[in-house]
Amino acid sequence: MDDEQLLLHPTSILAREACLPPIVSYCRYQRRLAALRVACAPPYANPAAARLPPSFPSLSSFRAQDSSRHLTKGLSSVYLPLYWRTKVPSPPLRKHLPIDALAHLTLPLQEGLTRLPLVLHTLPHRARTFPQQSS
């Protein structure tokens, strides 16, 4: 590359040198990872997991009693939120509920599984420590 191209695209050059993934791919990965954490969390330990749809394939059948899904029962079909397995149409006339959107992100990860496993114990976060310098 010549110097003129480097001046026009400094961010992309820095990202290539640092071997960073494109931000769109990284954000999609982080959203799926968060959805997987909620989907595999025990509902009694994670309030978001307790609000997953009743048809979500989890090993736990427990669902929160204070879920507000009953508020959508009298709505016409235009205003109803999408079923969590349904792909969002283009243009998005209807949307998922926020917890259903998380459940929808786990669909590609559910292929070949009848139920998602529950992760009962998570590893503690590693403390970021710096190596001690010996004098």
Image (tube, grey):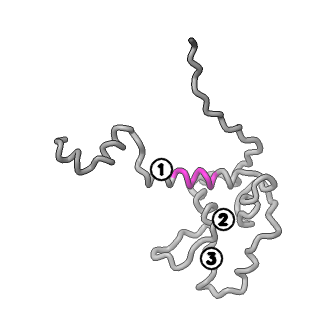
> Residue flagged by tag 3: what amino acid is it?
Pro
Where residue 31 appears, x then y in whole percent? 56, 55
State how far apart marks 1 and 2 are (Cα): 21 Å
Indicate yes or no whether the magenta region holds residue 131: no
Which quadrant of the structure image shows residue 100?
bottom right
Of labels 1 and 3, earlier in sequence is 1
Asked if 42 appears above or below 50 in the picture, the reply is: above
Please tell me the numbered disc located at residue 99. 2
> Residue flagged by tag 2: what amino acid is it?
Ile
Query: Secondary structure under badge 2?
Result: helix
- Look at 71% across and 63% down and name the residue there: 52
Say if mark 1 contacts mark 2, CB within 8 Å.
no
- Look at 68% across and 55% down and name the residue there: 39
State how far apart marks 2 and 3 are (Cα): 11 Å
Q: Is residue 82 toward the left or the right of residue 40 in the image?
A: left
Which residue, given by chain and number where applicable, does mark 3 sit on?
81
Write the start and end of the magenta stretch as one range.
29-36
- In this rendering, the label closer to the viewer, 1 or 3: 1
The chief SS type of the magenta part is: helix
Of labels 2 and 3, earlier in sequence is 3
Which residue, given by chain and number where applicable, does mark 1 sit on?
26
